[in-house]
Image: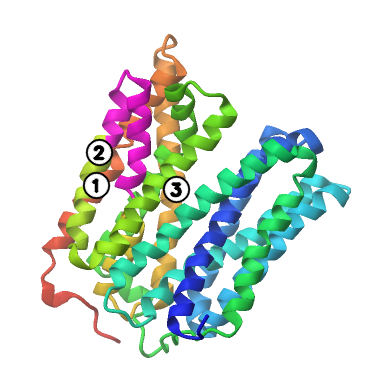
Amino acid sequence: MQRTYKGTTIACYIGYFVQAIINNLSPILFIVFQEKFGISLTQIGSLILINFLSQTVVDLISVKVVDRVGYKAVILASHACAAAGLVMLGVLPSVAPAPFSALVLATVISAMGSGMIEVTISPIVDAIPSDRKEADMSLLHSFYCWGQMTVVALSTLFVWFAGDRYWFVLPLLWACVPLCNLVNFLTLPFPKTLREDEKIPLKKLFSERNFRIAMLLMLCAGASELAMSQWSSFFAETGLGVTKVMGDLLGPCLFAVFMGLGRLLFGIYGSRIDLKKAMFACAVLCIACYTTTALSPNPLLALFGCALTGFSISLFWPGTFSLVSGLYPNGGAAMFGVLAILGDIGCSVGPWLVSFVSSAAQTADAALTDGGALKIGLGFGNLFPLLAILGLLLLGIRKKSKTSVDKP
């Protein structure tokens, strides 16, 4: 590989693949952790929460750090943490006197890597000179989808064929990816971060109406994705009549394939398409998908609506990054960090709303089945693409001459 910005871009693609490994490997092993180490469901829930909180804390810290120390130092640290966390996940639980504490440590270290990747990869690609930045950003984010699909499929098949006795091999094998990419990043060129006197202060960004709208769009992006994707296994089981193991494999994979396909297509043809119009069309399609999934009495049609939601939300996250970068080219890495935090908050708010409404519906009508209550909750999930449409319309009101903020 030539030591050029093209090589840096490819390494960034692999970086998002690494993030997919961190976020999707542990859930596949939760049943193994229960059986091998006596980990309770409450403790498993704690691991999920610890992963989210650790990433969010790192996002908050990185907002202030990245522009000061530079992209290279942070991206190398992120891959070192990712590799170390995966190795710990494979080794420590079997040798530590307290397996749960070992799992917590491995989760925190790998989540630190994931958080640093989240706030550095996108601004690196955005800062690399290109005449097709919007398409490049979409293609970049598609690699998280391909990573999710690959990790879920290969890891599930490994446990299925090799047996859970060799589960510890999986994290060690996947640790090779961030380790190799770390070595790759060592000799690659990086764009320079903005000096303090060049970038727009966050206080100034927060005062900007368009940036606040973009924050809303990011929250809607995370919420629209996770509110549906967390139930993809359920719809695969009911729609295809398969076992829970197959549902856990097919559901997330179908969702990831459609989401990755949407980002890949825009990555190829995006230079010919108006991004804002494409995002608006995706939001309308998202409403149609949520409505179909919520109202369809046909399990197969509900599964299709669930999977197609992946396609409909594919541009929300990378598209918002690109829109904001165009509006505020001197926002710096801190700007991307703030947006990533809002996206992560949306990833929690969306599933919470669906679960809350579903539980409330079942409390009000005891005869309601779990599936029926879930469909009511998903109907309320339409709130997020509706808010995204409103945000895109408001974003379009701004005069074109006001596309950036003056430096202080």
Is disc 3 surrounded by few (<14), some (14 to 19) or many (20+) residues within 10 Å?
A: many
Residue under the point 33% across and 41% down: 309
Residue picked out by circle 2? 287
Is residue 311 part of the magenta span, yes or no?
yes
Quadrant location of residue 357?
top left
Q: Can residue 231 be seen from the camera position used here? A: no
Asked whether residue 309 is drawn in magenta, I would say yes
Q: Nearer the viewer, residue 364 or 91?
A: 91
**399 or 89, which lies in front?**
89
Instruction: Give the image location of residue 102, x and y in percent.
Output: 78, 52
Element under disc 3: helix
Using the image, determine if residue 381 lies above or below residue 194: above
Query: Are dots 1 and 3 in contact, CB under 8 Å?
Result: no
Q: Which residues are magenta?
A: 289-313
For mark 1, give the secondary structure: helix
* Type of amino acid at the residue the image marks with label 2: Ile
Q: Quadrant of the C terminus?
A: bottom left
Residue located at (34% from left, 83% from top): 129
Q: CA distance from mark 2 to mark 1?
A: 6 Å
Q: Is residue 339 left or right of residue 78?
A: left
Of badges 1 and 3, nearer the viewer stands: 1
Number of on-image labels: 3
- Residue at numbered disc 3: 347
Using residue 144 as the reference point, say whether residue 81 is left or right of it. Answer: right
Q: Position of residue 206 (x, y in %)?
A: 32, 69
**Which comes sooner in the sequence, label 2 or label 3?**
2
Q: Which mark is residue 283?
A: 1
